[in-house]
Image: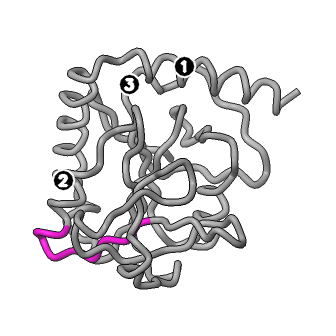
Amino acid sequence: MEKQNKTSLRKEFLKKRDRLTPAARARDSAIIRQRVLAHPEWQDVHTLLTYVSYRSEVETYKLIQEAIARRKRVVVPVMDPESKELRLSELHALGDLAPGAFHGIQEPAPCHVKRVIPMEIELVLVPGVAFDRQGGRIGLGGGYFDKLLDSMPNARRVGLAFSAQISKRPLPMAAHDIRMHAVVTEKEVIPVK
């Protein structure tokens, strides 16, 4: 029942996100970026993990550029083609990115991969299809990011989403699902108690 509910919610919220025009996504991504840059946790962090935006997700390329310019240690996920698990790599420049094996999502080209251990991560910027006000999250359904988040229990987890992706009701959560500490949208920063 929960899986079916998650599947229908995933489709519903993906449609909402995909319906945003490119101009609206760019505008709202810029507002979200400014909210992240102004957040106290961003100011204090040295090592952060961020996703590299894909399709209609909140855009992260400019946020990555800003982090590199501020001399923060930027880490991004890399799909291990053998284990089908996400690993971590430091990213020094956007030019080091290339289409990866998993849906062509950008990741450091093999010659630029510099492994990072999960315990070094202080802050994680998390993608998602839907979030709720209790920190619940629905991703694309593979569990990849939840497994990765589980390996860094001390890192602060901040979801990035457009306001259309915020569920009015609590999302169904399984025991292995990881909650966010906050969610940033173009309209607000949602703190999770």
Find residue 176 and report its image quarter.
bottom right
Q: Does the magenta-highlighted stretch encompass residue 63? A: no
Residue at the extreme left? 69
The kind of residue on which mark 1 rests is Lys
Marks 1, 3: nearer the viewer: 3
Q: Give me the residue at 78% from left, 45% from top.
A: 174
Q: Nearer the viewer, residue 94 or 150?
A: 94
Spot occupied by residue 115 in the image (x, y as percentages of width and height): 46, 84
Spot occupied by residue 50 in the image (x, y as percentages of width and height): 38, 60
Q: Give me the residue at 47% from left, 17% from top.
A: 16
Q: CA distance from mark 3 to mark 2?
A: 18 Å
The kind of residue on which mark 3 rests is Ser
In the picture, measured across the screen, residue 10 lies left or right of residue 99, that is: right
Marks 1, 2: nearer the viewer: 2
Q: Give me the residue at 62% from left, 73% from top.
A: 151
Residue underneath mark 2: 37
Q: CA distance from mark 1 to mark 3?
A: 11 Å
Q: CA distance from mark 1 to mark 2?
A: 26 Å
In the picture, measured across the screen, residue 116 lies left or right of residue 58, that is: right
Residue underneath mark 3: 163
Give neighbour class at mark 3: few <14, some 14-19, many 20+ (Cα, 10 Å). Answer: some
**Mark on residue 190?**
none
Spot occupied by residue 35 in the image (x, y as percentages of width and height): 21, 43
The kind of residue on which mark 2 rests is Leu
Residue 60, placed above or below residue 20? below
Q: Secondary structure at mark 1?
A: loop
Spot occupied by residue 52 in the image (x, y as percentages of width and height): 38, 54
Residue underneath mark 1: 168
In the picture, measured across the screen, residue 47 lies left or right of residue 178, that is: left
In the picture, measured across the screen, residue 60 lies left or right of residue 140, that is: left
Give neighbour class at mark 2: few <14, some 14-19, many 20+ (Cα, 10 Å). Answer: some
The segment highlighted magenta reads 68-76
